[in-house]
Image (spheres, rainbow, N blue to C red):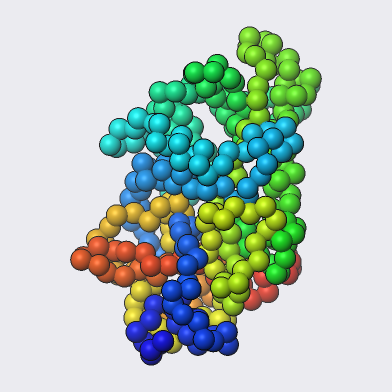
Amino acid sequence: MGTCANLNFTQRLVAVHPIVSLELKDLCVTFDSLAIPLEPMSQKYPVDHKSAMRWAICSAPLLEIKPNHSGAFWPTYSWFMDLWESADLPSVVHLDEEVAENMPIGRYFELLVRNFFEYHPDWRVVANQVVLSADGQTSGECDLLIEDCHTRTLYHLEVACKYFLGSAQSSDWSNWKGRNTADTLANKMKKLETQSNLFTTAIGQLWLRENELPQVRKMVWLKGYLFVPMATMLKPKFPRWHCDRARVGWYLPLTALQHWPEQTKQWLILPKVWWIVFPNLSHAQIEDHLMNMSELSEQLRQMMMQHKQRGWLIAQVDCEDGQAVERTRGMVVDDRWPERRES
């Protein structure tokens, strides 16, 4: 496989890891967009909303759910691709709400989806963020009500963009956890089912009548990333019903970075607004913020001490014809994850 100095980080991890005799062509796992807040960078972060919107629509769902699971429509990857191809988007996409640097990724994802349907000639956004309440108590919130202009079908769409790490070699949804280990795939599936049933309740039915709207069909999107331990990435265990095209990445405990003597300044802790898409930037625009492995390890150690987040997303960035090119990305978690952190 050659010397480690000539390999990128992912290749070198495999080269020196105990799982030996591996060919680089076997490294076919897709590493895609994920990011988190980056305090040391103070400038504004450029974002290409059209590229982000394309990811929001065209990325595969995390799970391949039967079309009418729990009475809801769970679109397939091919359905999403057809949806994108049928759109008529301008060369530059503008959103109807300002994107703050620290906007939660789920909120940004929802904003991208809503604006996509606003642009689409075959769909109409009827309502969004509908909050239903009775006697001063909130009963639930609907992400989107959208109408298929051809069939006149009204859909209640619930969307989620989540990032789950496999905490064990298990397909059980409860073993796929977020950086906050209370956030699991199992809990998210239950929540989505509850949310999607909002308009089957008495208060939901009343709201539809009051607004002179027909009965709705339920639709659910669950997208994001699945992260597997680096040591298992060539033979990963994915959650039950996972989609083969789902976005996949790796994760490592912080102390593991100490074993990789990377001296080249190639590493970046990604700002939150780049969770979905790495922007088109010249290498000169970010080179002052790139770190070698020892600098990265120390920066992450300090950030984990100062912040509640237990995981941070990093990217390996190269220079190609003067442009910054992302080669791979993964999550670094604190050494005790997924144990519960003591308060």
Counting every numbered tag in the picture gives 0
Question: What residue occupies the far bottom of the structure in this picture?
Answer: 3
Q: Relative to the observer, which residue lies in front, 117 or 262?
A: 117
In the rendered image, residue 284, in percent from the top left (x then y), is placed at 23, 65
In the rendered image, residue 319, in percent from the top left (x then y), is placed at 27, 69
Q: Residue at x 36, y 64 (%)?
A: 326
Q: Residue at x 30, y 32 (%)?
A: 90
Q: Relative to the observer, which residue lies in front, 297 or 49?
A: 49
Quadrant location, the C terminus: bottom right
Name the image quarter holding residue 336. bottom right
In the rendered image, residue 194, in percent from the top left (x then y), is placed at 74, 36
Name the image quarter holding residue 254. bottom right
Position of 129 relative to 7 (above/below): above
Q: Is residue 250 visible?
A: yes
Q: Residue at x 45, y 56 (%)?
A: 33
Position of 215 relative to 174 (above/below): above
Q: Residue at x 75, y 44 (%)?
A: 190
In the rendered image, residue 32, in percent from the top left (x then y), is placed at 46, 59
Q: Is residue 44 visible?
A: no
Question: What residue occupies the far left of the structure in this picture?
Answer: 321
In the image, is 248 to the left or to the right of 266? right
Quadrant location, the N terminus: bottom left
Position of 111 relative to 186 (above/below): above
